[in-house]
Amino acid sequence: MKEDIMNIKLVRAQARQLQLQHPKVFSYFALPTFLTILASYMLTGTDITETLAHMELREGILFLLSRQIFPAIVGFILSFLYLGATFRFLISASSKGEKNFGIFTIFQSQYFTPAFLTLFIKQVILSLWGSLLYVSQLLLTVVSYHVLAINESSSTTSTLRADTPEVQAILKLAPTMTTGLLMALVGLLLFLPFYYQYSLVELILYSRLMTGTYDGPMSILRQSKEEMKGFKSHRLVLDLSLLGWQILSFFTLGMANFYVKPYATSCQIIFYHTLLQKRMQADSRFQQKAPDLPKSNPLD
C-alpha cells in the first residue's frame, strides 16, 4: 500500500508547539540527561592508545568489547529513566491518566516488568542485527589507535617517504581499514531497517500499559513492525533533520541534551500521531488509539 508523504517540517513545527503547551517537559528529562552526562564523565577511562598499539587486531577487539560491558549496562538502566520521562510527558499532555506518575514510577512492578521484558527483547534483536556494524566499529577503532601510535612514533621525523617504516606500517593497515569500512556500510544497511521497524515500541508500550491491554513484548514488537511499514524512510528523514541538534549536543559534551532530548521525544510523539492518522485514513484496519493528547494539542 502506497503511503502519502509525511510532512516532516510540519511534524517538527507541531512538536515545538507541543513543547510550548507543556513547558514542564524539560524538567521531566532533566535528571536522566544529567545522569547521562555524569556517567559519560565517570566511564571515561585512561588513554588506551599505547595499550592497543601493542595488541593484535583480535586481541584489541576483545579488549574494547570487554570495556563496553559495564557502560552498556549503565546505558540500559538510564533508558528506563528516559522511558519514565517519556511516560510522564505523555500523561501530562493527556486528558486522562495518572497525574501522579513520576519518572521513577516506571520502576514499580506493574510497569517495570513489562517495560524490562519489552526493551530487553528489542535490544537483543537490534544487537543481533547490529553485530556486524558493531564489530566493524571495534575493528576501525583498533586500527585507528594503531595509526595514532605510528604517527606519534614518527613525530620527530622531518620527512616521511613511501619507503619509511612508518608509512609502510600504515600501508599494511590499509586493507584492514578498507575491510572495516565495507563491513560498516553493509552492517548499517542491515541494521537501519530493523532499528526503524521497532522505533515505535516505547510509545506502543505506553498505550498498552495505560489501557491495560499489554499482552507481552512480542505483540508490541509485531505492532510496531506493522505500523512502520511504508514509514521507515519518513522516520529516517525526521532523524536526519535533527542531526544538527545531535552535533550540537556532541560539541557541548551533552549539555544541549537538556533541550534536544525533550524536543526529539516530542517529534517522535507527533510522528506517531501523524502516522496513525494516515493509517486510519488509508485503511480502517489501523483505526486504533494513540497516546492521548489534550484537546489543545497541535493535531486537533
Image (cartoon, rainbow, N blue to C red):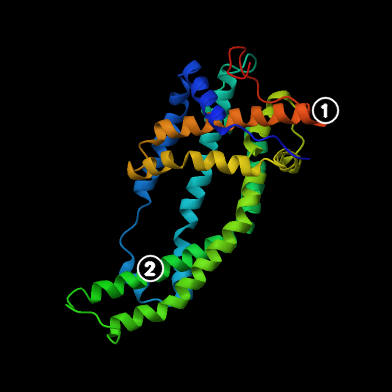
Relative vertical location of residue 125 with respect to residue 104 in this rendering, above or below? below
**In the image, residue 96 lies at what x, y percent?**
65, 15
Task: Please name whichever residue, 5 or 44, is drawn nearer the observer in this view of the structure.
Answer: 5
**In the image, residue 84 lies at what x, y percent?**
55, 31
Residue 53, visible in the rendered structure? yes
- Find out whether the residues at labels 2 and 1 contact each other: C-beta distance under 8 Å: no
Q: As drawn, is 255 to the left or to the right of 130? A: left
The mark found on residue 35 in the picture is none
Q: Which residue in the structure is indicated by mark 2?
A: 144
Q: Residue at x 17, y 76 (%)?
A: 156
Q: Earlier in the sequence, mark 2 or mark 1?
A: 2
**What secondary structure is found at the residue carrying circle 2?**
helix
Q: Residues within 10 Å of mark 1 (few under 14, many from 20)?
A: few
Relative vertical location of residue 205 with respect to residue 170 in this rendering, above or below? above
Quarter of the image where the C terminus is located: top right
Residue type at the position of mark 2:
Ser
Quarter of the image where the N terminus is located: top right
Mark 2–mark 1 distance (CA, rounded to whole Å):
53 Å
Relative vertical location of residue 226 with respect to residue 143 in this rendering, above or below? above
Q: Which residue in the structure is indicated by mark 1?
A: 284
**In the image, residue 179 lies at what x, y percent?**
51, 72
Residue type at the position of mark 1:
Ser
Q: Residue furthest bottom?
A: 163
**What secondary structure is found at the residue carrying circle 1?**
helix
**In the image, residue 194 lies at what x, y percent?**
65, 50
Q: As drawn, is 103 to the left or to the right of 245? A: right
